[in-house]
Image: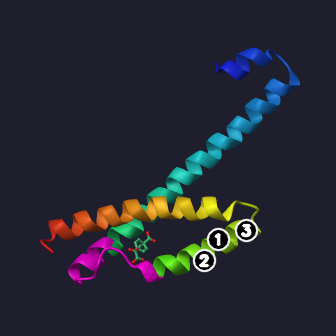
């Protein structure tokens, strides 16, 4: 049992916390599965780029993605700066994968 659950004891607040945490766990699972699917796509993009001698990063594409995500975030009441940081974090990892694929291909 977590510290918060321990402190709340048998109470409506504990029931609410548990229900909210169950939803958070479902959302986290969905995020992991969505990220796994995204990385499956980007692995294929990495191979495509390596075999066609394209650079791992595409700053023009990233600019479009950032603008779009910032707009979506704003509409969804999510901090656009956070959405941009989150995308940049993922894209940085993707570029690292692309570079590894290119190095493997001898580019
Ligand atoms: O679309 C591409 O060209 C990708 O390599 C994918 C991706 C992304 O993760 O969305 C990653 C790196 C690029 O700089 C831009 C976008």
**Residue at (73% x, 68% y) in the render:** 74
**Residue at (45% x, 57% y) in the render:** 36
Q: Residue 55 colored magenta?
A: yes
Q: Is residue 84 left or right of residue 23?
A: left
Q: Is residue 49 left or right of residue 76?
A: left
**Residue at (75% x, 38% y) in the render:** 20
Residue 25 picture location, percent across and down: 63, 40
Q: SS class of the residue under badge 3?
A: helix
Q: SS class of the residue under badge 2?
A: helix
Q: For the residue carrying disc 1, how many other residues have a C-alpha within 10 Å: few (<14), some (14-19), or many (20+)? A: many
Residue contact at pointers 3 and 1, CB within 8 angstroms: yes
Mark 3 and mark 1: span between their CA atoms? 6 Å
Residue at mark 3: 74
Of callouts 2 and 3, the N-terminal one: 2
Q: SS class of the residue under badge 1?
A: helix
Which label is found at residue 54?
none
Mark 2 and mark 3: span between their CA atoms? 11 Å
Residue at mark 2: 67
Q: Is residue 81 above or below residue 20?
A: below
Residue contact at pointers 1 and 2, CB within 8 angstroms: yes
**Residue at (12% x, 71% y) in the render:** 106
Residue at mark 1: 70
Mark 1 and mark 2: span between their CA atoms? 5 Å
Q: Quadrant of residue 15?
A: top right
Residue 105 picture location, percent across and down: 15, 71
Asked if ligand 1 lies within 8 A of label 2, the reply is no
């Amino acid at each position: 049992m977590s510290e918060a659950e321990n402190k709340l004891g048998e109470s409506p607040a504990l029931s609410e916390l548990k229900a909210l945490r169950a939803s958070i766990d479902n959302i986290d699972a969905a995020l992991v599965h969505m990220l796994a699917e995204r990385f499956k796509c980007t692995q294929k993009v990495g191979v495509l780029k390596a075999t066609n001698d394209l650079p791992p990063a595409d700053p023009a594409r990233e600019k479009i993605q950032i603008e779009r995500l910032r707009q979506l975030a704003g509409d969804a009441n999510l901090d656009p700066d956070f959405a941009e940081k989150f995308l940049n974090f993922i894209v940085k990892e993707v570029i690292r994968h692309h570079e590894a694929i290119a190095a493997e291909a001898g580019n």
